[in-house]
Amino acid sequence: MQKFYVALDKSPYPITVGSDLLHQPGLITPYLFGEQVCIVTDETVAPLYLETIKNTLKNYQCDEIILPDGEEYKTLATVELIFDKLLSNRHTRSTTLIALGGGVVGDITGFTAACYLRGVNFIQIPTTLLAQVDASIGGKTGVNHPLGKNMIGAFYQPRCVICDIDVLKTLAAREFQAGFAEVIKYGLIQDAAFFSWLEEHCEDLLKREPNDLGHAVLRSAQIKSAIVEKDERENSLRALLNLGHTFGHAIENLAGYGNILHGEAVAIGISLATELSVIKKWTSTDEMNRIKKLLQKMNLPIQWSPEISGMALVKQMMNDKKNIHGKLRLVLLKNIGNGIVTDEVSEEELYQSLLK
Amino acid sequence: MQKFYVALDKSPYPITVGSDLLHQPGLITPYLFGEQVCIVTDETVAPLYLETIKNTLKNYQCDEIILPDGEEYKTLATVELIFDKLLSNRHTRSTTLIALGGGVVGDITGFTAACYLRGVNFIQIPTTLLAQVDASIGGKTGVNHPLGKNMIGAFYQPRCVICDIDVLKTLAAREFQAGFAEVIKYGLIQDAAFFSWLEEHCEDLLKREPNDLGHAVLRSAQIKSAIVEKDERENSLRALLNLGHTFGHAIENLAGYGNILHGEAVAIGISLATELSVIKKWTSTDEMNRIKKLLQKMNLPIQWSPEISGMALVKQMMNDKKNIHGKLRLVLLKNIGNGIVTDEVSEEELYQSLLK
C-alpha cells in the first residue's frame, strides 16, 4: 500500500494505491465528517463491491444509489435523482458522498457533492483503470449536455481517493486495455523513464501482474496530481493532460458515443498528435515508432475507423475547439517525456497530417 | 459613487454604490474577459433596464435571457434553460454572465456561472434593495428543490457588484420596505452606531432620499462583506447573518411562499429573536422596544399571522434545522450591535418565547 498527498489550496488529501483496500474501514472513516454516508455506484459495480464498502460503514447511516450503467446517464437528470434521495433521507451538510465506480460515477457524484447544500464532503473509490489513473484525480467533476460532453460541472476536490488494484481483475479486457492510453500519456508528457518502464513491463501489465499494475497506477496518479497542484483550474500547465484528447474527442463524437471507448479514442489521438509532432520536426520518426509500437502492444488502436473521413475529423476538431473553448490549441511532443501545449498548428498542417 | 473591495482567496472584487451607474460602461467592461456576454434578467426588470445595459455593451456579443418573474422559477429547470442558450450561442470559457435583477435572478445566474464549463465569469447588478444589501454579496448562489429552498448551489463570487441606487425608485413600496429588514439586521449584529443612524434617518429612507439610501446600502454591503471575508463558507462567523432567518424561514414555509415577502418574514424573525434574547436576559426590554419600534417605523411586521400556530412554528424550526443543517442554532443579541450565534437555546425556551 502506498500513499501520497495532493497539495491544493485547502487541506491536502491522500491518494492510496494498493491491494485489498476496500475491506479497510481505516481508509475511509477518518475522512467522514458526520454520521451519514451515501454511496453512489452503478449496476455493474454494485453486485461486486457495494456490500464490501457497506460492511466497513456499519456505524453510519449508509444510503446507496445504484445508477444504470453508461455515459448516457451522465446528465443533470441523474444529479437531480441523487438530490432527491439525499433530501428525502435528510442528509445534512456533514454528510459524505462516496463514488464507487468508473469515471461516469465519479464525475456525477463529485458534481452532486459540489452542489448539494453548496458543497459536501466526497470520497472517490475508482473501480476502473481509467478512473484510477485519470478521472478520479484532479477534481474535474460534471455531467454532459445534449450539446456537448462535460459542459456542466465544477472543480471540486475529493477528501481522499482509494485505488484498490484488486478491483481491476474484474474489468473486461477491452476496458482494462483502454485505460493504458492515459497511462502511456503520462510518460509521454512528463516522464521518459516511466515510458521506458512501460515498454519493458507491458506484457506483465496486460497480465495484470499486481506489483507492476500498482506501480503504473501510482506513477500515473503522481504525475497527474503534480500537474493539478500547479494548475488546478487549467489556466496553463494542466492543458498538457489533454494530449490525444482534442483528436480523441472529435473521433468519439464522429464514431458516436458507445462505439469507441474513451481510452481507445485517446490512443488514436496520441498517435495523431505524434504524427503532427513529426511534421513539426519536434519528434523523430524513431520516437514516433516507439510510441505507436507501445500503443499497439497494449492492444490499442492507432488509426481511426475508415468510415470517418479525415475532412470530417478536421471540421469536428475546429468546431469543438474554436466554438466552445476558443482557438485551436493542441498538445504535441517535443520528444518522449516532454509534452508541449501549442497554438502554432495551422489548419494546413492539420490537413497535411490527417488527409494523408 | 463609492467603491470598496471584497478581499477573498482570489483576486479582490469591487462593490460600487451610487447613482446613475447603469449608463457607465467603465463599470462593467473592465471586468469582462472575452467578447461574449449573456445578460440574465426577468420580465419585471427587462423593460426598465435591459436596454440601458445593452447600450454599454455594443462591442460585445450580447445575448439575453428574460426569465419569468418569481421564486417558483428558481429551479434547476431554469438553470438548464440558460445552459441551452449559452451552448446554442457558443459561449466559451471566457464569457461573462450578468445578473440584472433581484435575489432570484442573482442566485440563479451565479449558480449557472459556477457550473457552465466548470465556472465562468459573472457580474451582479442587483435591482432590489434586498439584493443590493444582501443577496448579491457573499457568493451564495443556488436554486430551490421541491424539498427545500437553496438546497442546490455553490459558493461562487462575482467579478464585481454594481449597486445603482436610482433603480430603487421603481420598486413597489412593500418590496422596498422589506429590504430594510436586512439593513436593520446589520446594525443589530455588528454596528450599534449604524442602528442609531437608521433610527434617525428612517423617514428620509422611506422617502428614498438618495444620499441616505446610498449610505444605508453602502454600510450594509460593507458589514456583510467584512463578515464574508472572514468566513466565506459559513463555518462560524457568517452564521451571524442569519439573525431572524431561522424563524423567518419557518414563517415563510408555513405561510406558503408568495404570501409573505422574505424581508417581512425576517422582520418578524428579528423581533422573535429579540424576545428570546430578553428571555435569556442578554438584551434589555428597552433595547427590544427600540428594535420593534424601528421595524414598525419601516412598515415591517413584528408578529406572524394568527393563522399560524406557535406550535407549528416550533415544529417547523426544529424540522428545518435538525434535519438539514444539524442541531438548532440561533442568532440572538447580546445587545444592539452585538449578535451571537448560540446553540444554548432549549426547546423549552423556544416554547416559552413562541407560545406566549
Image: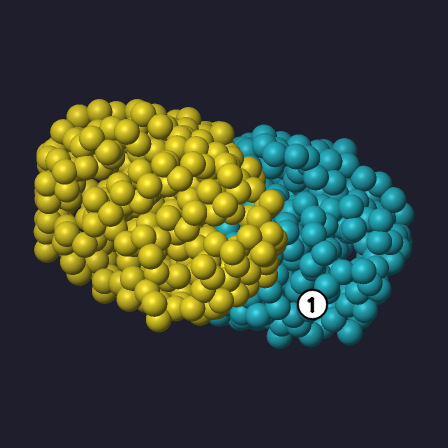
Chain colours: A yellow, B cyan
Res. A189 in view? no
What x and y, as percent, mark residue B22? 83, 57
Residue identified by numbered label 1: B63
- Residue visible at 69% across and 59% down? B36
On screen, residue B92 above or below B140:
below
Does A84 sit above or below residue A25? below
Residue in the picture at 46% in, 42% down: A278
Residue shown at 60% from the left, 52% from the top: A346
Tell me the chain of label 1. B
The C terminus of chain A lies in quadrant? bottom left
Res. B57 image quadrant: bottom right
Image location (x, y in percent) of residue A87 = 34, 58
Q: Position of residue B288 (x, y in %)?
A: 64, 42
Report the front residue among A79 and B292: A79
Of B260 and B131, which appears nearest the observer?
B131
Determine whether, in the image, residue A42 is placed left or right of residue B334: left
Asked whether B228 or A165 is in front, the reply is A165
For label 1, the crowd category at 10 Å Cα-Cα, with few meaning under 14, some 14 to 19 and many 20 or more, is some
Type of amino acid under label 1: Asp
**Quadrant occupied by the N terminus of chain A:** top left
Residue B14, compared with residue B32, is above or below; it is: above
Q: Is residue B173 left or right of residue A87?
A: right
